[in-house]
Image: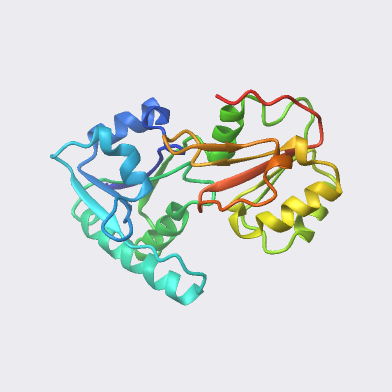
Amino acid sequence: MATLCGIGVGPGDPELITLKGWRRLQQARVIAFPAGRQGRRGIAEEIISPYKDPQPIYLPLEFPYVLEEEVLKRAWHKAAEQVYAYLAQGMDVVFVCEGDVSFYSTFSYLAAAVRALDPHMAIEVIPGVCSPLAAAASLGVPLTVGSDRLAILPAMYHVDELAQVWVWAEVVVLMKVRSVYGQVWQWLKEHHLLAQAAVVSWATTPQQQIYTPLTNYPELTLPYFSLLIVWKRRLRFNPV
């Protein structure tokens, strides 16, 4: 029976692919990944490029960057049909995505759409390094210690969400902070937290940028893959 295998290939550095993920890639006959934009490689394809071999079939899948649920459902269904065409022939398909496959990943939707086509399809998940862990490592600090409570907000549309979780969390990660950075910076300033926060863009890649202390950065033009971490405890950053 064929298997659909999701592999998290990490935040950007190809050496952060797990040994299990790497071995599965070497065995794969069909490797799928989110297609890039404007003729460029997608991030997951870029990560695995040092390991690409001419033998497997490479299958880019289109996933639109929109919020309209119906548009997304059609894209997931189309991608699932493309993948299932190989699975139905008894060929395993590996789908690679940046970060971890269970952490806000496209693979979750693809796997669900494939299961809708065939409820008995075997699904395998190989975890990877997700961006909050990579960012903390790049800053040279532990993300959590002791009994720290961690909150991760996938995308903030109002700073009130930060205020709500700050009541109970000792560490807060704001994913995709680009669109609300100005509001968040002001909130951090008002609460005297700028020295305890940092922004990391493109963690572990050659394009990585670290911004700390945030007192120096009231305005930033950030790329899509940027996150902000703020701690209640005082700590010294040791960027690497």
Identify which residue, 111 or 43, lies in the foreground. Answer: 43
Is residue 95 something one can see in this rendering? no
Q: Residue at x 69, y 56 (%)?
A: 182
- Left or right? Give the position of 29 relative to 42: left
Residue 55 placement: quadrant: top left
- Percent across and percent down for residue 212 are 66, 36
- Percent across and percent down for residue 97 are 40, 46
Quadrant (top left/top right/bottom left/bottom right) for the C terminus = top right
Residue at far front of view? 216
Q: Residue at x 41, y 32 (%)?
A: 13
- Left or right? Give the position of 63 relative to 83: right
Is residue 104 something one can see in this rendering? yes
- Left or right? Give the position of 169 relative to 120: right
Q: Is residue 46 above or below residue 140?
A: below
Q: Residue at x 76, y 58 (%)?
A: 161
Q: Is residue 131 above or below residue 16?
A: below
Residue 47 placement: quadrant: top left
- Percent across and percent down for residue 201 are 53, 43
Residue at far left of view? 55
Picture colour scheme: rainbow
